[in-house]
């Protein structure tokens, strides 16, 4: 599987999402994913599964080959809170460093320069290899890149065929950052979609694979989540076929005004 290289940091283009995976099941699945070739695992303080993810990664014996992302909760973005929370993440993961640390959601009550300053300090002190953001809009990306002292490598955003994210994707790229797609199979609803199923049949693939291929073919990093081993294998087998321009255009037409699936009271004003 290809890595995306951003500002000197290498991020494998397919990772395992772990939201809602917990305990032994989570540890086992992380181990199975790594055995199948996954080299990128996505967790967050909010998911309550850092200990289980860390155990799966350590048990694989491949810690040094794996990029583990975790994300700081929006209510812990003041510098002292952030530093404490990341040290807590490290002890739950039982790691000596986090590969990629993200701001999970923006928090308008905390100056971005303060949060990013604390993240830069963690990076300089060796606790974190790279830093980035999640759920950032065009305006927030501009501000973050203006005030940060360390390069920001990605913006993790909701991204699938049902949602037009072209503005924020263009802005992310204009700052030299990678786009990481969360909910990349639209929380499972790609399976059963008539257009995706029809294209899948011509390639001998599943609709979920067509959906993921649509994103990776645009240079986007994807972090699908599954609780099933057979799907783990499927979700990484995306590099032995190609979608035509016509197929890409057909899939792009699935975008809908109401296509957003992840939206909370604390969400920023979306582009
Ligand atoms: N930064 C953020 O704010 C944010 C927000 C949301 C998510 N995320 C991250 O992104 C990851 C992925 O997003 P997500 O969990 O929302 O949704 P997703 O990956 O788009 O979809 C997960 C759903 O799809 C099903 N599925 C997985 N592979 C499949 C396949 N090959 N065929 C058919 N169905 C399949 C899964 O069911 P089974 O388990 O039954 O396979 C599950 O119900 C999360 O786990 C998390 O790490 C980040």
Image (cartoon, rainbow, N blue to C red):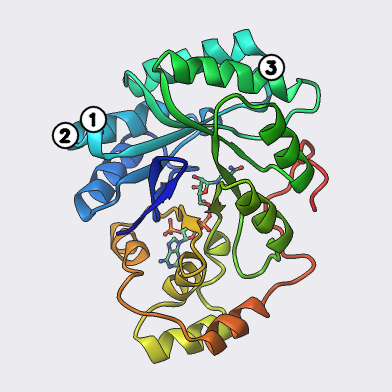
Graded by Cα atoms within 10 Å as few (under 14), some (14 to 19) or many (20 or more), the crowding at tag 2 reads few
In this rendering, the label closer to the viewer, 3 or 2? 3
Residue at 59% of width from left, 79% of height from top? 251
Say which residue label 2 marks: 61
Does the beta carbon at disc 2 come under 8 Å from ligand 1?
no
Which residue is more in the foreground, 213 or 18?
Answer: 213
Say which residue label 3 marks: 114
Residue at 71% of width from left, 66% of height from top? 164
Graded by Cα atoms within 10 Å as few (under 14), some (14 to 19) or many (20 or more), the crowding at tag 3 reads some
Which residue is more in the foreground, 246 or 77?
Answer: 246
Residue 30 percent across, percent down from the top left? 30, 43
Residue at 38% of width from left, 36% of height from top? 68
Residue 116 visible = yes
Q: How many marks are shown on the rendered structure?
A: 3
Residue 27 percent across, percent down from the top left? 30, 37
Q: Which mark is residue 58?
A: 1
């Amino acid at each position: 599987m290809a890595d995306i290289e951003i500002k000197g940091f290498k991020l494998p283009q397919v990772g395992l999402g772990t939201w809602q995976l917990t305990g032994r099941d989570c540890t086992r699945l992380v181990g199975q994913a790594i055995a199948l070739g996954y080299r990128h695992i996505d967790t967050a303080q909010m998911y309550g599964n850092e200990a289980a993810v860390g155990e799966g990664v350590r048990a694989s014996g491949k810690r040094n080959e794996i990029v583990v992302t975790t994300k700081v909760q929006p209510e812990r973005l003041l510098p002292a809170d952030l530093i404490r929370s990341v040290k807590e993440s490290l002890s739950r993961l039982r790691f000596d460093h986090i590969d990629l640390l993200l701001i999970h959601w923006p928090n308008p009550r905390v100056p971005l320069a303060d949060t990013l300053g604390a993240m830069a300090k963690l990076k300089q002190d060796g606790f974190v290899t790279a830093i980035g953001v999640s759920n950032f809009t065009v305006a927030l990306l501009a501000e973050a890149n203006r005030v940060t002292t360390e390069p920001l490598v990605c913006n993790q955003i909701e991204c699938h065929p049902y949602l037009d994210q072209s503005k924020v994707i263009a802005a992310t790229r204009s700052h030299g950052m990678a786009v990481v797609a969360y909910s990349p199979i639209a929380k499972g609803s790609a399976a059963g979609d008539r257009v995706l199923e029809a294209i899948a049949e011509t390639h001998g693939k599943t609709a979920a694979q067509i959906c993921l291929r649509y994103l990776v073919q645009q240079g986007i990093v994807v972090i699908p989540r599954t609780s099933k081993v057979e799907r783990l294998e499927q979700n990484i087998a995306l590099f032995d076929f190609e979608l035509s321009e016509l197929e890409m255009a057909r899939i792009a037409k699935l975008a809908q005004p109401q296509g957003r699936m992840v939206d909370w009271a604390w969400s920023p004003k979306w582009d």
